[in-house]
Image: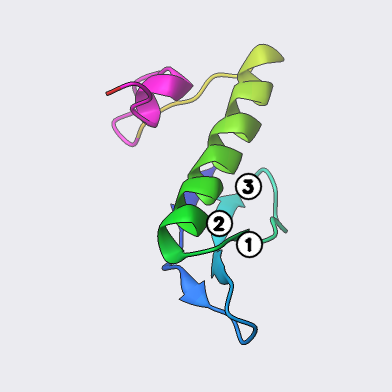
C-alpha cells in the first residue's frame, strides 16, 4: 500500500481540493475539500489517518518504508 497526497488546488467555484491516494487499499478516494488549501490538506491527512486506524482496529498492521511497524498516530505525528 502506498499513501500519497497531491498538491491542493483551487476549484472553479473557489473551494480547494487535495488529492489523496491509498493505492492498494482504496483505489478511488475522493479529493478532500476545504475552504482553503491548508484546510483541504489537513482534511486529506485526517481522512487517511481515519481509514488506516479503522484497518488497525480490525487487526491490520502499518509499516513504514524502512519496513518497521508504526503506530498510525505516530505516522501522522498527532499531538506534536
User: Residue 46 location in percent, x, y?
Assistant: 54, 39
Which residue is rendered at x = 33% and y = 36% of the image?
65
* Crowding near the residue tagged with mark 1, few <14, some 14–19, many ≥20 C-alpha atoms within 10 Å: many
Judging by the rendered image, the residue that carries numbered circle 3 is 24
| 55 falls in the magenta region | no
- Pick the quarter of the image with the N terminus: top right
The secondary structure that dominates the magenta segment is loop
Q: Secondary structure at mark 2?
A: strand
Q: Which mark is residue 31?
A: 1
CA distance separating discs 1 and 3? 17 Å
Apparent side of residue 5 relative to residue 77 in the rendered image (left or right): right
Q: Please state the total of marks drawn on the protein image.
A: 3
- Circles 2 and 1, Cβ within 8 Å, touching? The answer is yes
Of labels 1 and 3, the one closer to you? 1
Q: Which mark is residue 79?
A: none
Range of the magenta residues?
65-79
CA distance separating discs 2 and 3? 13 Å
Mark 1 vs 3, N-terminal side: 3
Query: Residue 47's quadrant in the figure?
Result: top right
Q: Is residue 53 above or below residue 29?
A: above
* Crowding near the residue tagged with mark 2, few <14, some 14–19, many ≥20 C-alpha atoms within 10 Å: many
Q: Is residue 6 above or below residue 2?
A: below
- Pick the quarter of the image with the C terminus: top left
Amino acid at each position: 500500500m502506498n499513501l500519497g497526497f497531491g498538491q491542493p488546488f483551487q476549484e472553479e467555484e473557489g473551494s480547494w481540493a487535495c488529492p489523496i491516494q491509498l493505492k492498494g487499499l482504496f483505489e478511488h478516494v475522493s479529493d478532500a475539500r476545504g475552504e482553503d488549501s491548508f484546510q483541504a490538506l489537513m482534511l486529506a491527512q485526517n481522512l487517511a489517518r481515519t481509514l488506516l486506524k479503522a484497518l488497525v482496529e480490525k487487526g491490520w498492521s502499518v509499516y513504514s518504508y524502512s519496513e518497521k511497524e508504526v503506530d498510525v498516530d505516530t505516522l501522522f505525528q498527532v499531538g506534536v
